[in-house]
Amino acid sequence: MKLNLKIWRQANKDAKGKMVDYPIDGIEPDMSFLEMMDVLNEGLITKGEEPVAFDHDCREGICGMCSMHINGRPHGPDDAVTTCQLHMRKFKDGETIHIEPWRAKAFPVLKDLIVDRSAFDRIIQAGGYVNVNTSGRTIDANAIPIPKVNADLAFEAATCIGCGACVAACKNASAMLFVSAKVSQLDLLPQGKVESDTRVLNMVAQMDKEGFGNCTNTGACEAECPKGISLTNIARMNRLYLGASLISEQ
Ligand code: SF4
Ligand code: FES
């Protein structure tokens, strides 16, 4: 395949970026998108040029690192996949492909296609955990009865990989799908009930502090989420937030 890549190049956080054209040839349809980027970078290095910086780690849809906006969609034109799971057969020979970093105030561009997503880490630090008794008298998790429906919903919420595509897809750059998945994952289990109120209040407060926008029920986040995280998690988080706010005001 022959392609014309238009890639966002930005030397550092403070530099002014721009789209740069990179014609590329010899791409196999069965290559992954990141393998295509590897071929591009090998060519650039051979020519003595600076390779394109992009994030990646697992390359199997688990780590959530491979954040790229491809032809206007987070993670590209395929549904329910991450960029590392996207294949070049989804593009046409001769096609022009626009590749940009996530765009959100809370995700500043560090270099080329790499953005700083540490805002997500700080939201998790604000409450995305459960405290457990480590005295030696810890209850075996298997001894705690959990309704199957809740176990399944918690598991589905836990499949969020923190990639940030929901933020990139949202016109408000809202992180509500990510935060609600993390809140739901813990709140649906008995172990997570103890800190339920403080968790939702603290995580939402941190989310607002980081500069993410609010949810206006557009649904772009759910449509572009590679893990199919449901909007119902946002509804659950809103219910929990309202309840916790009323209790905290008493
Ligand atoms: S909710 Fe989906 S799109 Fe958002 S961070 Fe989690 S996996 Fe990525
Ligand atoms: S590189 Fe880990 S999800 Fe893509």
Image: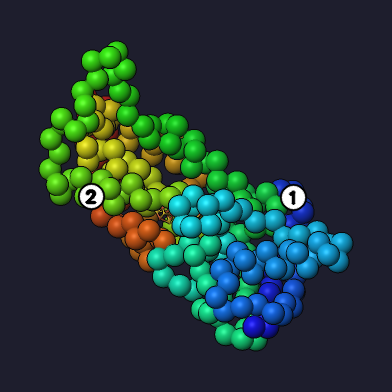
Query: Relative to residue 145, is residue 64 drawn left or right?
Result: right
Whole-percent x and y of residue 10?
74, 57
Whole-percent x and y of residue 59?
53, 57
Query: Relative to residue 180, is residue 81 drawn left or right?
Result: right
Task: Using a 10 Å C-alpha cutoff, classify the residue at mark 2 as few (fewer than 14 neighbours), some (14 to 19) or many (20 or more).
Answer: some
Whole-percent x and y of residue 3?
67, 80
Instruction: Point out the frontmost of discs 2 and 1.
Output: 2
Q: Is residue 109 visible?
A: yes
Residue beneath label 1, please?
12
Q: What residue lies at 58% left-to-right and 68% top-to-bottom?
A: 33
Q: What amino acid is found at the position of numbered circle 2 in the picture?
A: Leu
Q: Nearer the viewer, residue 99 or 88?
A: 88
Whole-percent x and y of residue 203?
39, 36
Q: What amino acid is found at the position of numbered circle 1 in the picture?
A: Asn
Residue beneath label 2, please?
153
Q: What residue lies at 21% left-to-right and 26% top-to-bottom?
A: 140
Q: Nearer the viewer, residue 73 or 201?
A: 73
Cα distance, mark 2 to mark 1?
A: 41 Å
Which structural element holds mark 1?
loop
Residue at the extreme top of the image, as rendered? 135
